[in-house]
Image: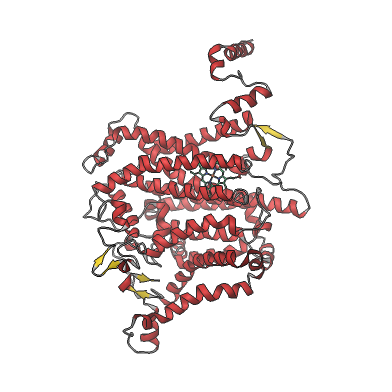
Amino acid sequence: MSDKKKSNIFQQLGKSQVWKSIIRSGIPRTRRQRMMSVLNSLFLHLHPVRLPRHAVKLRFTWCMGGLTFFLFLVLTISGILLMFYYRPTVEYAYTDMIDLGEQVPLGIMREIHRWGAHAMVITVWLHMFRVFMTGSYKPPREFNWAVGVILLLITLLLSFTGYLLPWDQLAIWAITVGANMARATPFLGHEGPGAALLALGDINFVHIGSDVKFALLGGRFVGEAALLRFYVLHCIGLPFIIMILMAVHFWRIRKDGGISGPT
Amino acid sequence: MMEGFKLLVNTLAHPTIMLTAGMLVFLFFFPPNDWFEKWNRRLHLNFLWTKKGFYFVIILMVVFFLIGLTDPNFSLIIKKPDNVPIIGLIFFVFIFLWISMSQALKNDKLIDAGEKPEEYNDPEDKVLVWPDLVYIEFIALILCMSLLLIWSIGLDAPLEGPANPADSPNPSKAPWYFLGLQEMLVYFDPWLAGVVFPSLILFGLMSIPFLDTNPKGGGYYSYKQRRLAIPIFLFGWMILWVALIVIGTFLRGPNWNFFGPFEFWDLHKLVPLTNINLSEIIYIKWFSVGLPENILVREIFGFLIVFGYFLLLPPLLAKTAFKKLHQNLGNFKFGLFIFLLLFMLSLPIKMYLRWLFNLKYLIAIPEFFFNI
Ligand code: HEM
């Protein structure tokens, strides 16, 4: 009895003007409606309408690319919430972190953001591992694999720039270790091989105040300018790039003939 | 007994032993040619990719970590909040390696029998994205979110003392996903470990589709059809990337000295620094003359070795071990392939030169920050 009533409610809902204005094909019940609901939705039509059987098997893709994308969304949302409370200055950054834990109700946003970021690094690696093991980089997917490699790099850079923001001991020293490598860049770092060659007479073009490490940190060491630079890259620059590349990545999956499979 | 076990683990965990064992065993588990495959079959190593093998390894790992938790030194490291993901990584790498390898072996059997791999299905027989895929994605999403929530409620994000540029902690570690690179710093100067190697890793990864011209094995798991590609990739990923991260995280303490998992991180642990350069070995130890003034004369042997490695080995390999590959790829692609491979292998080679001869640099020109 109640079952019948429920289906009635849903059926009526599916016929209502409001529902139809949003999802034109009604409640997806018939084969046709199901296909239309995927086709007509901006988000769902990232997918094709029909897929080969193996492609929906968890055993094949491990859903790793999808989870990476999902984690990226979680990180975006939790990151926006964190931005409400966080000021990227040497004066406030650290105390804002403490407040986030102590003053903000239900304060696990920082945890979700940090552990989510770690998880995303792991899922990207595993996704690459899956794509390799199924040989899915082979033609015609060479380009999408290369796009993936850049996505991997940007994921790591996002994580790296975020690492500095709490402005605690862990943060600045981890970034110091990382940034110190930059000063050894061949030609472009002041302690890199070849840098001394880029000189005109006595004038060194690449010195401690002009090399790539300086450009990265906005100074000679990890300080106020580095914090701001990393903040801007972390919240705007890198997400901007990764979103464009993800769009390309997803577009190319479809254009390369959908998920790979044996022929 | 427990003490004996811990001592044993501490000893075995040393990079010299652990990595050597790992690399030796590796080729038998992932045979690149018939000879290794014969031994793989004789030793029944494919047991690892059966269900029993799976449970065996998982139980072994769980027991190891449980025992580890009872040890004050070990639990101190693995309970560090930022180290938790690496424990996850260790398990996940094994689990997914197992899934892909067991599926690959299944498909290999099917292909041997003249059938299509398991992933194959009739092109006419497709499923609808709604509901078949959307439903799976939804479940995966819920599971992932619940895990993340549990993790977030259970474990606080770390916050140490406020940043103090005057007080550098010992050890200072990069974020965990870069610890493989930091570990490389033990063997190479930062311009190599921090700049050249990462660039070549990215470049090498991107060139995989162009260098692996094997038309088979696309779109399904298989091992037999890709006996060269899979071992090379797995070697780089599991040993030179993941294993180095594990070493860098769990086994490197103050002053980047090695500490076994059950060893106390003693700030004052003394490790003799006896590394010397190739030029010193040759001119001072062997010839008992001083180092020559001229830099090029001083470093000539190092240059010869490095140039020989990158210029003589490729044509030699093209005529011997990789004869067929060279014919398939042509000069340019083969050259690129062998260059990337030699670069990758230079890391373990440098490790052994260090461990066996205390070699610091092959070429040492600190005047120009040019040390190899
Ligand atoms: C931010 C990072 C990334 C996201 C969000 C992402 C997302 C996805 C998704 C959702 C798919 C569909 C199939 C699946 O889930 O496995 C996919 C496929 C693919 N990805 Fe990624 N990916 C990322 C990084 C990478 C990386 C690092 C690589 C390789 C280096 C890569 C290479 C590929 C290729 C070649 C395919 C096609 C696979 C096939 O047709 O079987 N992606 N990606």
Q: Position of residue B62 (x, y in %)?
A: 51, 49
Q: In this view, does A243 lie to the left or right of A103?
A: right
Q: Position of residue A191 (x, y in %)?
A: 31, 65
Q: Position of residue B144 (x, y in %)?
A: 50, 37
Marks counted in the figure total 0
The quadrant of the picture occupied by the N terminus of chain A is top right
Q: In this view, does B179 lie to the left or right of A31?
A: left
Q: Which residue is drawn at 43% across and 61% down?
A: B3
Q: Which residue is drawn at 23% across and 69% down?
A: A202
Return the residue nearer the eye: A167 or A224. A224
Q: Which residue is drawn at 30% across and 35% down?
A: A100
Q: Position of residue A27 (x, y in %)?
A: 61, 19
Q: Which residue is drawn at 73% across and 41% down?
A: B121
Return the residue nearer the eye: B86 or B104. B104
As drawn, the residue found furthest toward the front would be: A200
* Colour convention: secondary structure
Is any atom of residue A235 visible in this view?
A: yes
The image quarter containing residue B313 is bottom right
Is any atom of residue B95 visible in this view?
A: no
**Above or below A168: residue A206:** below
Return the residue nearer the eye: B366 or A85. B366
The image quarter containing residue A204 is bottom left
Q: Ligand 1: give its quadrant.
A: top right
As drawn, the residue found furthest toward the bottom would be: B288
As drawn, the residue found furthest toward the right would be: B114
**Above or below B291: residue B365:** above
**Above or below B124: residue B173:** below
**Above or below A240: residue A189:** below
